[in-house]
Amino acid sequence: MKKNCAFLLLISLCFIPWNFFAQESSEIPDDYFPETAHLEKMIADAEKDGEIREPLLKSFFQRLITAVLIVIVQAIFIWLIWVFIKKLSKKIADTGQSKIKPLTIKKLKLLTTKQITSVIIFLIRILKYLITAFLLLITLPIVFSLFPQTKDIASALFGYIWNPLKGILLSFLHYIPNIITIIIIIVIARYVLRGLKFFADQISRGRLTLPGFYEDWAHPTYMILKVLLIAFTFALVFPYLPGSESQVFRGVSVFVGIIFSLGSTTAIGNLVAGLVITYMRPFKINDRVKIKDIVGFVVEKNLMVVRIKTHKNEYVTFPNLLILGSNIINYNTSSDEDAEGLILNTEITFGYDLPWQKVHEILINAALATEFVQKRPLPFVLQTGMDDFYARYQINCYTKNVDKTPRIYTQLYENIQNACNEAGIDLTSAHHFVVSEK
């Protein structure tokens, strides 16, 4: 700061001899030539010159003193600003850890308290240098304007400062109607979004019902309408944005559009597939499904992917495009309240020496003894084949606890084995095997 003030003062003082001699030469008559005049005329002219020089010197020194005072006052003002900003930065650094909270969006921490404090101090320092530069730029034209020979320089310096500020101010004043229009459009769009979200929440919670519109459609439909409304709002606001008519702005917009189109073909395909799957309603969250030979529970369903958690706590991710082209088995659709339940079945073979009535009794009793198997409707047995040495039997039982399927099958196998052992049936036959559908 001291160097800047000294440099400013040095510039001002450098103009002292020039100002003085320029003023002196401009006031002396053009026909004053002492080498060709008489002595009397020289004396008279000298007396007249002395009368002119004395007020010129007085006026010059007054202006010089004024310039020095302006420089001193400006230097003191800049020094006070620097001291104030230094104390302010120190106070922010000392109290920032306790008063400034980290910047977080939901559970994602973007900036810590220390980082925010450092950014604030950095911005304050930038503001300090900007204020100092502005004051120095203001001081130089003021000092130069005090002397007639440097008024043109002062006017040029003032123009360098005032003309950009004037242009910015006029542009802002002319842009005020556009700002008001943009604000009105954004406010209307915001309240429309709030209304859509309110109706979506009411539908998803079952408080509002629309014929043919399911509750799980509420949120995806709201997101679609939200994107469309934002795009429509941007289309309305775009003509009022500054520089929207410039070729550079249009070129950047076209370039971004091309990059987005080329780089997001698969993403857009998954997005469209996600919308189709949403309105197809093949499954819901927590449903037990089978996709591509993977059996598990749906834990996440969005517009891009579907994630399934298997019975082994494995997470499998399927792109929506893959799901849209695959067969999907939903085991929960048979376990609704108005349905009989999911039918679990397994096949087992017995030799022809064992009467089929006995086989039916053993299998039905084993199913009824299994936990989570419904007593109504009763389990039933189907004979699915007759081979050379044995017959095939299929035990079918109902359950609504589809999440317990592996446990139900385990207990069913155990009960069949125990029932056969109690009945003295040998399960070690070379032609004996059990087939089940998971």
Image (tube, grey):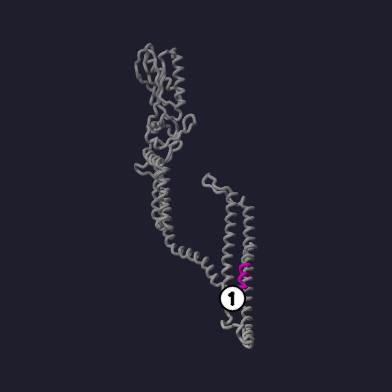
Q: Residue at x 35, y 19 (%)?
A: 384
Q: Nearer the viewer, residue 392 or 303?
A: 303
Magenta part mainly helix, strand or loop?
A: helix
Q: Secondary structure at mark 1?
A: helix
Relative image position of residue 429 (x, y in whole percent): 42, 13
Q: Residue at x 47, y 29 (%)?
A: 311
Q: Looking at the picture, how far across and down is residue 65, in whole percent?
A: 64, 73
**Which is nearer the eye, 311 or 34?**
34
Q: Quadrant of residue 274?
A: top left
Horizontal arrangement in the rendering, residue 31 relative to residue 370 (left or right): right
Mark 1 surroundings within 10 Å by alpha-carbon count, few (fewer than 14), some (14 through 19), many (20 or more)? few
Q: Is residue 88 left or right of residue 340?
A: right
Q: Which residues are magenta?
A: 10-25
Judging by the rendered image, the residue that carries numbered circle 1 is 22
Residue 237 in view of the camera: no
Q: In the rendered structure, does residue 277 fall within the stretch colored magenta?
A: no
**Is 20 one of the magenta-colored residues?**
yes
Q: What amino acid is at disc 1?
A: Ala
Instruction: Give the x, y percent position of residue 393.
Output: 37, 18
Establish if 403 lies above or below 97.
Answer: above
Apparent side of residue 79 relative to residue 284 in the rendered image (left or right): right
